[in-house]
Structure formats: structure tokens, C-alpha cells
Image: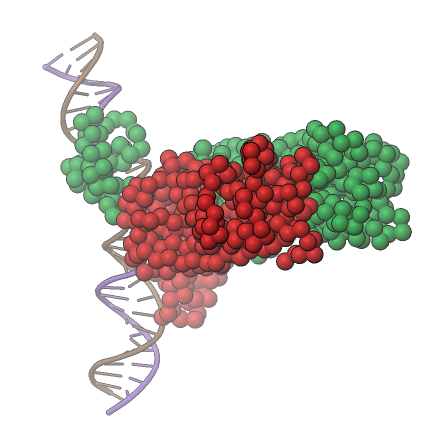
Chain colours: A red, B green, C purple, D brown
Amino acid sequence: MSTIEDVAKLAGLSRTTVSRVINNHPYVSEDKRKLVIEAMNQLGYAPNSLARSLRSQKTDMIALLIPRIINPFFSKLVESIEMYASEHGYQLIICQTRYSSEKELNYMNLLKTKQVDGVILASIQNDWEVLEPFLDYGPIVLCNEFNERANVPSVMLNQMYGGYIATKHLLEQGHRRIAYCCGSTRSNVASHREIGFRKALSEYGIEFDEQYAFRDALHSEDGRRVFHQMMSLSESPTAVFTGSDEVAAGMISEAKKHGCKVPEELAVVGFDNQTITELMEPTITTVYQPVEKMAQKALEIMIEKIHSRTYRQREVYEFPLRLIIRESTVSNKLTDQ
Amino acid sequence: MSTIEDVAKLAGLSRTTVSRVINNHPYVSEDKRKLVIEAMNQLGYAPNSLARSLRSQKTDMIALLIPRIINPFFSKLVESIEMYASEHGYQLIICQTRYSSEKELNYMNLLKTKQVDGVILASIQNDWEVLEPFLDYGPIVLCNEFNERANVPSVMLNQMYGGYIATKHLLEQGHRRIAYCCGSTRSNVASHREIGFRKALSEYGIEFDEQYAFRDALHSEDGRRVFHQMMSLSESPTAVFTGSDEVAAGMISEAKKHGCKVPEELAVVGFDNQTITELMEPTITTVYQPVEKMAQKALEIMIEKIHSRTYRQREVYEFPLRLIIRESTVSNKLTDQ
DNA sequence: TCCGTTTATGAAAACGATTTCATTTTCTTG
DNA sequence: CAAGAAAATGAAATCGTTTTCATAAACGGA
């Protein structure tokens, strides 16, 4: 492998001049520039980015922590962030915590060991007090997550509003016994949705009924299970708000299998606007999340922080969600969009 | 930020000794070791991995090139590779080529600039002659892709067999007019499936009919479109082999919308065994791909190549696919699995 | 006690770039 | 044409490690 020294020798110049050519610095004459470029081509030279990074104290790498990439919401997020990162000359390191706090901590060390310029947290497993000290080593940006005590930028979606509009829609359709079916309580995402859910109910003078609450539903099989749990209640709900399209789809599939008509006997709202919402029959009413916008903003903030070098600033950027009404909540099959 | 020098000073020792402690080298006395560890803790010291990498000529990073991560097949692949990589102390850099040969080339430079120890190609956009020279800088492993002229290890699934068993299944159900509906012709994956498809047909003495071939179907909307194209033929097919569950789902959804019964009037086979195959009605017959196994093997080979430093060895590892029969090809609703 | 190992430690070179500083050459301008 | 500014170039320091080599101390066996 050839080094800058080899290029310099071949061109009959110094390392400094070669470096100037590489970095487009001024004050290098046209003829020497040509000499250098020719030498580089001849040797197939490419600058060693480790050496560059070591000297310039930046890696142009960003770590992105997510629970699991197989979740379509997160793959969409990764796709978007990677795109914008690449556009701005950054590489993305994928870190799957799989909901483990130790793995999270392990990945946070990428910041401490200077392997990345910053960390985007799209999942938080540790208490903030544990994560805070890492700010000594570089910026942290929260994306799609939120923490009361975190003194860093957060880019997020208004999940409360999402829970609110979805529930309000069900209420407007005349439903009064509405079940709540979301994922892991640990995440702030779910808890914010629940607040919105409760807010809508209370506006209609309805009390939140704990027997209608299911807080451990993540996948389609969970949807199937919860369907049966709901139906075995003395007064089963007539509508259900779910935290994911997959759960909604599982629930609808199971309902149909057991002769329960959707939406007539059970109205279902999903979350995410995944492909499956338009493939199921009935098509699924859902909440659209502007993931690209959030991703873009998160990266923009991250780059700004990397340059400004002030990491301990609390800022909150929130994007609104949008309800997409389809067949799973409205009997009139004409309604779509 | 503290350096090894700071630790050495605080402990009253030399950099060398501190380095020995960090790397668990022999020949350092117990009391000095303790001194060093205490100094490291006191300073919150973490070794700078750029400096380490520069010196030791390895980064413990691997680049993974894929077209788009949002495709469930690839997110599954990324999830698996990331897991095994992490277990072996490697970080994964995600590179989305978006089917662009320039982007691919750009990402290949990660190898040339020493930012990664190796590249796993799960997508090939350039001719092999263009990629070959990068072998001067590190190992390349093909994963789920294949190239006749590539003198590197390939870990792949037996796509030909996949196309074969799926088509044979349709033939066994009595179908004779079978459509072929796959994605981009550029990829070897699709072309191998076509070979298997043709082989099954010829075993039944049937000629491949070009009017039944659709080679640009990737997403559910494509499935919908192809459904109409098929139905507008004078003799429309009674069964169709598709290259993805999403396409199959789109096709089934559209068929149902237009009163075409699946599987009675149109039998459909998908590919991938995604979640959606069990959520649709009818559930979708599909081909299961052992992605985890392939991922694990690819990483194992990559690590071996990184250490052995012999990159130009052609080796092929192939994993078998498995047909999962569900309702979309068999009228008897009892059949599942 | 002597000598060859084994154990323990540090000084300095190396990894491959960028940046600072010094020096030389060329250009302006009065 | 003299002198100050601008342009062009290179030597050497620097980034933070690991590794090589040298040296010293402790050990073990005859």
C-alpha cells in the first residue's frame, strides 16, 4: 500500500505539498498539482483515513442505536438517516441494542473511544444518569425518544397527538368501549400515546378502564392473543387502538378467522402506515409518522452539534402525526384516504 | 480527554507499561497493574481507537453493501449480520447503494482508505472487473449474490432450487399455464430463480412462454399491476410464481378486489416467508430462506479472510431453501405447513 | 558464586496523515 | 529598483497508540 510519502517521492515534492493537493488548499502551483495528481494515479494512492482522523480529530462516522432493525419503523428510520448521512459525507454505524442496557452501554463506548463523532439514540435502555457522562466525549441526539432529564436535543414525533387523534376518531364513530393495546411501557413513545388516548376519552367523559389496557403487544401474534383476551371479557370492547400496524393486522386476521366482523363488530386502528395497511382486507386505518422529516432533522442537528461542540443544550423538535382513515374503522367502504 | 501518556504519568510509569496492561500482555507485575488500573479509572481513560487502529492496521469494522434496508429481506440480513459481527467484536457500517453503481463504488473506497477491514457485498451493481482491483486493499465476500467471474468467497442460497420447488409445487397442483413474476434482471438471484422455474416446466414438457414473464416486480403495487396485465391476456395464467411475498400479497389483494378467487382461479406463490404471508387471507405459500445461517457463514468467512490475508480464493457455500405450503396454492383450507 | 534464563520496565521508532512554522521565490507598487 | 506583500514549498512537530529493542532485576541450577 502506498503512502503520502511514496507519492511525494514519486512527484519529487514534500508530503506537505501532496497533502495540500489532497485537501484543496490554496498556494500550490498548477504544475506541481498536476505532478502530484499524476503520481497519485500512478500509485493508486488513497489517503489512509485512520491517519487523517487521528490527526484531525474527527471520523465522519455516526453511531445509530436502535432496538432491532427488523422492525419496519426502525428500518425506515435507518434508511432515511443513512441517506442523509451519506449525502453529508458521514458513515453510519448500526447498533442493535435488542433492548439490552449492557449492549447499549457497550455501543456508547464508541463515543468514548473516538470511533464516532456522535451518537443518535433512537432507543434508550439506561437511566439518563448513566448516559449523561458520555457527553464529555461527544454529542448525543435523541431521535424518536425522549427523556425528561436529558439535557440534549430531542427530535421526536408528537405521539400524544397521535394517540389523541386516533382515539378521537373512534369516539366520533360512536365507540365508547375502546381498548388500548400498545408495546413496552419502558418507552416514552408508548406512554405518550397513552396520555393522548386518555385525553380523548376524558373529553368524552369516559373513564380509562384498566381491564381494556394491554401493554405488551409488539407483533402480529400479540394482536391475535389480545383479540382473544378482549373477547373473553364480560363486556368486550367495540374498538381498539393499537400501537403498530402489525399488531392491528394480527388482530384483524384473528377476528376474521373467528367470524368477528371488522369494523362492524370491532373497529381497529393501527400505527405507522406500513405497506400491510393497504394489503389487508379491510384496509387498516392508521397513523402516519413523518419518519423522513424526523430523520433529516436529527442528522441536521447532529452535524450542527459536532461542529459547534456544545453538547449539553436541551432542545425539542416535534413533528405532527396524521391520521389516515381506511376501512378498518369505517363501515362505508367508499372511505379511503 | 486523557491519553495513555496522562495515565502513565499519574501512575508514575511509562506508556509501554500502560499499553501492556490495556492489552493484557504478560510481564507486568501485579502492583504496577493495579497502579495503572487505578489511574485509568481516576481519569476516566479510554484508549483512542483511531490511534490503535492506525498502529495495528485493523479497524474491526466491516462494511455491508445492500440496495435498500427497507426491504424486509435485507433488514433481516442486516439484523443477523450485525448480531454475529457484534458477538465477534466487529462493528457494521451500513451502505445503501440504492441500485446505483456510483454509490457502490463510493462505498468500496472504505476499503481503499482503510476505514474497514473488509466488505460484504449483498448487492452488486458494477461489473466484477471494476470491483476486482479493490481486493488489493482487503477481503470482499459475496453474500446472497453471485458472479461467474468473481474470485472471492460467495455465500448464497440455492435460488435455482427455490424457483424449482415452488414451480414444481404449482405443476403438481395441476397448473399448466404458470406466470413468472420476479424483480430486476440485473441480479443473479432473479436469474437463478428463473432457471429453476424453467427446469420445472421442462420436466413437465412445457415451454417457457415469454408473454407470461414479468421481470420488473418489486413491491406490492407491482403485484397489483401485473395482476391486471396477466388478466388481460387472451389465455390468462392459472398460477403465478412471484419473487417476493410483497408482490404476491399485492397481487392477491388486487385479485380479491376484482372477484378473482385465490387459489381457485389464480394460485400464487411468494418468496421470503415474511410476516405478511400469515396475515393475508388466504395465507400465502412461500419459499423460506435461511437468512440467519447465510449471514453467520458470511461473517465467519469474512473474519477468516481478514486473518488469513488471502483474498483471491473462489469458494461457494450454498444453503437450501424450503417450500412452505399455505392456502394461496391449495384449495383445501386445512393445509397449512 | 557465577552465568544463563526469565521477568519487568522504559526510550524511542513506527503507523500515515495534517498543521505549524520557517524559508524562498514571485509579484506589486511607489 | 527597492521593499513589503503574496504565493509556493518543505522540515519537523503532532495526533495517541503499539511494538521493537535495550537494559535491569530476579531467579535457578551447577
Q: Is residue B109 left or right of residue A9?
A: right
- Where residue A242 appears, x then y in whole percent? 54, 44
The residue at the point 56 percent across, 54 percent down is A172
Question: Is A18 in front, or is B306?
Answer: B306
Count all numbered tags in the image, as a single digit: 0
* Outermost front residue: A205
Question: Is B336 in front, or is A192?
Answer: A192
> The C terminus of chain B appears in which quarter of the rendering?
top right
Does residue B310 appear in this view? Answer: no
Question: Is B193 in front, or is B9?
Answer: B193
Instruction: Residue B60: name its quadrant.
Output: top left
The residue at the point 39 percent across, 43 percent down is A124
- Where residue B70 appears, x then y in whole percent? 57, 48
- Where residue A70 appears, x then y in whole percent? 54, 41
Vertical order, B190 against A337 (above or below) = above
Q: Is residue B2 left or right of residue B297?
A: left
- Where residue D30 appears, x then y in whole percent? 21, 7
Q: Is residue B142 left or right of residue B236?
A: left
Does residue A156 appear in this view? Answer: yes
The residue at the point 71 percent across, 29 percent down is B336
The residue at the point 83 percent across, 33 percent down is B173
